[in-house]
Image (tube, rainbow, N blue to C red):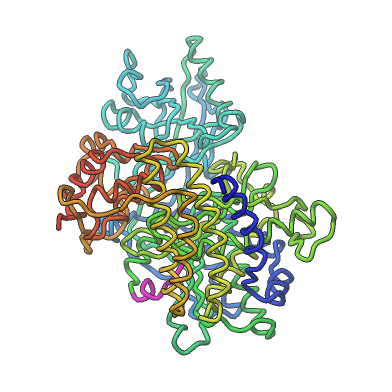
Amino acid sequence: MGKLTVISFWFVLVVRLVTAADLVDESVLKSFSQEISGEAAKRNLEYIVRQHRMRGSRGYIAAAEFIADELRKYGLEDVRIEQLPADGKIFYGTQRSRPAWNAEFAELWEMRKTPQGLVRESRLASWDATPLALAQDSESGEVTTFLIDVGNGILDSDYAGKDVRNKLVLAAQQPEAVARIAIEKLGAAGIISYAQNQRQAWWGENENLLRWGHLGTFAAKPAFAFMFTLKQARAFQQRLAAGEQILLHAKVIAGKTNAAYQVVTATIPGSDPVLKDQEIVFSCHLDHPRPGANDNASGCATILEIARAYAKLIAEKKIERPARTLRFAWPPEIEGTLAFLTAREDIRKRIKSAIHLDMVGGGPETKAVFHITRGPASRPSFIYDVADYFGKFVNRETALFADSGSAAFPLNSPDGGKEPLRAELAHFSMGSDHEIYAESSFGIPAIYFNDWPDRYIHTNFDTSANIDSTKLKRAGFIGAVTANFLANVTPNDADKLQQLFKACAVERLAQAFDRSLRLNSDNAKKVQGFRIWYERAIIKSLKDYIDLPDSFGADSERFLGTLQPVVGEPVALEPSGSSPVYERNPEIKGPMTAFGYGYLEDKLGSEKSKALRFPKHHGFWAEAGVYSYEALNFVDGLRTVREIRDLLSGAYGPVPEDMIQEYFAALESIGVIRKR
């Protein structure tokens, strides 16, 4: 039998196995599908989007208190808002705490000279009207001065022949990058940025998008910055190019104060005397500017709705109380999660897995595609297969409903869409709190529900009008039933899990075979070697939840053995005496880049960190940043650099060993890792 024929045979088997792997009773699925409400989630979302939710700000606190009040109404237990001090000096692992930021007032006016003096011509930006018009971490200032166009504003050449001292500069890039030259080196009075939205197919098309702007929290010199739409910026550029002088008046009352990270948290305690000390956590991030509907009021409102539905179904005895405890957490993005897991080690030790929701409600106008994203290759776990299973289930049911108007689980809201979900079952990508849970300091496998692309992310168009209540319901359903299975899984589920494992392993090994065809022999073997290692690690991950029968491992090994002729014999991932071994410093927890602060850049120095090649490396199957994140995850005091190179190459595509060694030497110099 040829390889392609064998693969075809196994794909037929996959269909049978996936259909056979009924992980939960239909009555449980029905209960959640009937109770979880996309309309209720969207109603809560509409309150959250009214708040400008910067870390520690009044708007953030209002949103946090609203969520805590709702949780108490829903009957959850241990509802509280954790207060974790943040003053710019305290560190939580690799996160330098960032003080709270509030704005009282900000306006930008064009001025006109008259015989009677200066008068206001037109208001160009207002904090009260549109908080996004003021860049985050702006400081107080007031000035009446002229506007100078500096192009991108991030290179010395952008300022050639231009006197920007005490002027306002108009720049295309983010204020933080512009400030390093315009403010700190050349003495500009402030910045007006028209930085565009994050790059995707629709980048720069909509001239009316106002982008969320940032200044550096720990910048050497205080500054303020306003944000313009592309339409505003182009109009001013035309006037400046024609030789017109533009006089502006800016006034900002804003700044940072020592305060705290607030993390809302609550639980549904488990029922099992032993297992209740283990937790499944629902995660999101509460911070972001107003409106911030999909990013990330959608995730916040959806896990709030999961909490409500779960508590109500238990109270009505429609489902059993979970054996393990369910925890729900609403922190500031990345920095709050890192602070929470570092400061509350007692909770962190109880968490078995995380289900993270960040952007889960984008309607058709956003062009969003919903993803169920696996954890990193360095953290294999069966929980990803469970989430994939329920994602496929919802894909099938909602497609059937869209095609025929009838399905057992249509999972649509009366005021929402009826389109099929078409969730992408995706490989690991970075960009949210899931990467903190899965980082090797904490080692918690995390599933990531997210929309991408979203053409309105971080703009004034990310409004509740663009949120689909049907999608909120579907994301909530997948999250709830996944958590329900993980919270209740027992040794009695071993047969179901083995069927699921085999089905998913066939798909992954077939993909490995396809990938290996594009590579030379040596790198193809790395792909094959990684994949067999990964499948064995998936089996081991089950032992964190249940006691497996002796036959489970042997049967799984026999199964993998039957597939090896298809993907080829893997290269042995064995340590080499000529390649060094590193271990983590347990005192330094977290990734090398957190939020608004880079540990590596700070400790190593800006120039040295920029010179490192590895953080910028991207491969066939990974974006820049994934390799360096994963390399540190693979450091365990046992693997050599060469072995880590092989694992990274197998998972994400070839990478040179010397690039990894250069990076590890830098980490060693700042005490993050050390040679064995």
Q: Is residue 314 left or right of residue 67?
A: right
Residue 339: x and y, percent? 35, 63
Taking depth in this image into account, of 128 and 280 the one nearest to the observer is 280
The residue closer to the viewer here, 361 or 236, is 361
Percent x, y for residue 342? 32, 66
Q: Nearer the viewer, residue 363 or 110?
A: 363
Q: Is residue 161 visible?
A: yes
Relative side of 668 to 405, left or right? left
The residue positioned farthest toward the bottom in the image shown? 273
Q: Position of residue 630 (x, y in %)?
A: 35, 51
Q: Position of residue 645 (x, y in %)?
A: 29, 46
Instruction: Reply yes or no: does residue 103 show up in magenta.
Output: no
Q: Residue furthest front?
A: 1
Q: Residue at x 58, y 35 (%)?
A: 209
Q: Nearer the viewer, residue 229 or 607?
A: 607
Instruction: Locate residue 258: give its quadrant.
Output: bottom left
**Residue at x-position 51% and y-position 31%:** 109
What residue span does the magenta drawing correspond to? 346-353
Outermost top residue: 242
**Which quarter of the image is occupied by the C terminus?**
bottom left
In the displayed structure, 279 sits above or below 8; it is below
Q: Residue 347 in magenta?
A: yes
Compared to residue 321, the image places residue 651 above or below, namely above
Residue ID at (34%, 33%): 179
Is 452 located above or below residue 159 in the figure?
below
Question: Is residue 291 among what the camera can see?
Answer: no
